[in-house]
Image: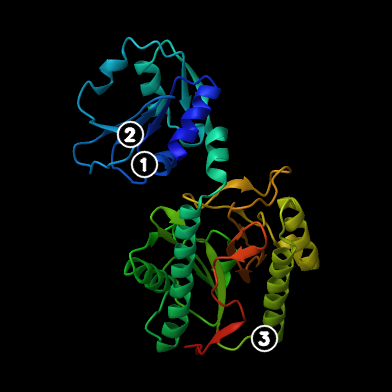
Amino acid sequence: MKLRQFQHLLAKNKIDLAFFSHDDPAVYYFIGSEFTGGYLLITPHQAILFLSPLDHKPKKQGVIVRNLAPGWSAKYANSTFQSIGINKANLTVELLDRIKKIFPRAKVKDISSSLEQLRLKKTKTELVLMVKACALTSAAFQALIKELPQKRLKTEQDVALFLEAFIRQRRGTIAFPTIVAVGKNSAIPHHLTSTTRLRCGFLQLDFGARINGYCADMSRVLFLGKPTTEEKRLYHLLADAQQAALDTVKSGISLKELDHIARMKLGKYASYFNHALGHGIGIEVHEQPAFSDSHAVVMKDVPFTIEPGIYLPGKFGIRIEDTLVWNGKKREILTKAPKNFITIPFSRA
């Protein structure tokens, strides 16, 4: 289905062949497997997957599988192909050089936007996988809430490893590097989880499971110890801002409008919200639609995230994020873990 749609796009755009390296997300999208080496070549009428002999050989309808043996590209030496499609979003200089050597007379055309549009709307099967990934992510968070009071987890890395082990033990993989941040570290949205010891204050989590290639993305905040009135107030302000955006989700509303609504709710703290409200999600954690695109709107079966944050430099940061989708009638929040203000008993030792 997906492959045939793409082949129709190639014919429509007069692209003779699309060339992908094994690590391009498009390969997983069309084949449904990951590989350690090889190339996927697709024409309007044929798809050939050249794989390392060390890789498993998938059985995919409409796809011919061949070994990536020395001289594998010789069959294309006298090809009459005039245009080669590439995914510029995942193109290396080395891959471009290889393509030009194999097809020296052909013009190279970027087809990344066509791929993005094709991947935008998810099928029922894709959505089921995302629901499962989000459910596993939410379950990991619930397990962490029960584990933290046991005081076995001492550092940010300990927390990250606990979440990731929970996911892997249930046949999931990790969608992206888990973010666990305490204290001043949480004021950095993309903090690199470290050996920093847990301490009283906000504990920021941003993580997600991946099921059969499809991702979840969720951010939650816990508080270790006893919060101040101001800390509770800021958390509830952020939660209200996210809820305001969630409540406004409907078919056709612009993503920029949702972003504006969240910032208006944050009031003076909007100046401490220094990233977009969200992003599309699927086989990649960040994909289309983009909140920065003035033409992007909420569409049926197109999952995205909503994740407002408040980051006070040198103090702390908090972010609440959910993965959701508009199903044609209503919005469905896929990450169902609790978002109430949760405190964990913690001493200042």
Tell me the number on the disc at residue 228.
3
Name the kind of residue labelled 3 in the image. Thr
**Residue at disc 1, secondary structure:** helix
Name the kind of residue labelled 2 in the image. Val
Q: Are marks 3 and 1 in contact (CB under 8 Å)?
A: no
Indicate which disc, 2 or 1, sits on the residue closer to the N terminus: 1
Q: What residue is disc 2 on?
A: 63
Left or right: where 8 falls relative to 234: left
Is residue 208 visible in the rendered image? The answer is no
Indicate which disc, 2 or 3, sits on the residue closer to the N terminus: 2
Residue at left offset 57%, top offset 34%: 113
Q: Are marks 2 and 1 in contact (CB under 8 Å)?
A: yes
Residue at left offset 27%, top offset 16%: 75
> Residue 261, position in %: x, y?
78, 61
**Residue at disc 2, secondary structure:** loop
Q: What residue is disc 1 on?
A: 31
**Residue at disc 3, secondary structure:** loop
Q: Nearer the viewer, mark 2 or mark 1?
A: 2
Left or right: where 145 falls relative to 162: right
